[in-house]
Amino acid sequence: MPTKIVLNDDQIPQKWYNIQADMPTPLQPPLGRDGNPIGPDDLAPIFPMNLIEQEMSTERWIDIPEPILDAYSLWRPSPLYRAKEFEKALDCPVKIYYKNEGVSPAGSHKPNTAIAQAYYNKVFGIKRLTTETGAGQWGSALAMSCARFGLECKVFMVRISFEQKPFRKLMMAVWGANCVPSPSEETQAGRNVLARDPNTPGALGIAISEAIEQAVDDPDTRYSLGSVLNHVMLHQTVIGLEAKKQMELAGDYPDVIIGCAGGGSNFAGLAFPYVADKINGKEIDIIPVEPKACPTMTRAPFSYDHGDEAEMTPLMPMHSLGHKFIPAPIHAGGLRYHGMAPLVSQLAVDGLLAPQSYHQKDCYESAILWARTEGFISAPETSHAIAAVVAEAKKAKEEGKEKTILFNWSGHGLLDLIGYDKFIKGELTDVEMSQEELDEWTKCMEGHPQPMTAGG
């Protein structure tokens, strides 16, 4: 069995897979403030119409334009690895495969949609994109993609991550983007938050508000989101479509699929093509993983909620901790979002996914073992997937079952070493949300419409 399975450039998927075509429960529509479903025109000030069409499409396959395929070929197809040394260290009856999305220019899975979004905005005539970023992976990816297609890029980076990860800002600057800490004095949304709490660590919901505010104020600008939305999940499915070809070449099929999940995009990218198999009767465990400090899927209600703190986005049906949520400053900045992608949320409600949550110290412990066996230093976000792999391997040993595990190694942690330093020094603490805190944060959703569940 080879260590890695590599596809040729001509084996990059030519179409994205749209899970909406096969979901047992159709996705419920986003709603306006009046509680009525919104239409394409309501989103036009925020997104270009070609992406709005993808957002609302229920077609199973959507063609990938040639300029996007050309850009993808810089790093796609990404290699599929067999984690042989990690398997030995665990000494469990499992085969572990991982899709290495850290090989992109930005070092994560994020360019799969950043390239697509930059392209579609460019052909629509947009000159500038605004966005938010948590850990900086998304901001870096969009900065790189805007440079490729000749767009200006403005990034609002969650303040605590901006301070923890200064080299992310420098990466964005090299690619020509302007990155500022959020909340900032540049927007009314930012000024409002700073007036309430000048020392706030920030949150993705706040950064989103700032980015949208600047986008809607300028007809030449649109907003770009790195996760959560349907078209983002769509673009990421190149991961799982490639993985299926590679697993077939390996003569194997996974019993367990794992990915970390903050907004849901890297998880969805690997998992959705396999969710289609599960919908069609395949027995497979599909596990999105999140921090116990931000337990969106594992503890938060499934409700209509805003995607941002200032309530500028429509109401979306999703698991949410509440749009006013300010997360604890854990190092997995990309997993600190209050909501979960509506597509991922609906599939979880339908029982097709089995979400798990872990403490950050368990994740770093798993990531250290991974680095010392497989060699790659994982992003703090990715370490959550590795922690789940360890747990599933031990479970297989306890059950006396042989299992094949496939997970998404969604990005490297070479710019996230401060977290590793703190873990090695014993300075990291685990944070778990209390029920009282959960109840307090979710109060802002009181009175919101409630999505229908399987029981009606």
Image (cartoon, rainbow, N blue to C red):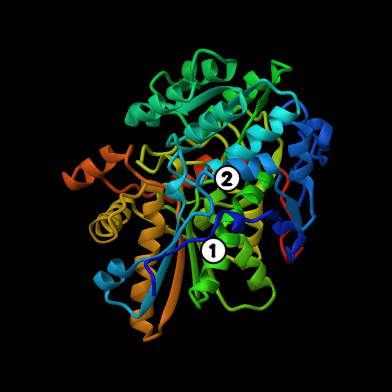
Question: Residue furthest toward the top?
Answer: 185
Quarter of the rendering occupied by the N terminus = bottom left
Q: Residue placed farthest to the left in the image?
A: 425
- Looking at the image, residue 339 lies above or below residue 407: above
Q: Measured from the top left, where is residue 436 in percent x and y? A: 45, 46
Q: Is residue 135 left or right of residue 227?
A: left
Q: Could you tell me which residue is drawn at 60 percent across and 59 percent down?
A: 11
* Disc 2 versus disc 1: nearer the observer: 2
Query: Which residue occupies 70% across, 39% down?
Result: 315
Place residue 126 in its image quadrant: top right
Q: Amino acid at mark 1?
A: Ala
Read off the residue under disc 2. 72
Q: Which residue is mark 1?
A: 243
Say few, some or many: other residues with alpha carbon within 10 Å of mark 1 (under 14 / 14 to 19 / 20 or more): many
Residue 350, image quadrant: bottom right
Q: Closest to the observer: 394 or 280?
A: 280
Whether residue 405 appears in this view of the structure is: yes
Question: Which numbered disc flags the more N-terminal residue, 2 or 1?
Answer: 2
In the picture provided, is 112 more to the left or to the right than 46?
Answer: left
The percent coordinates of residue 89 (x first, y second) are 24, 70
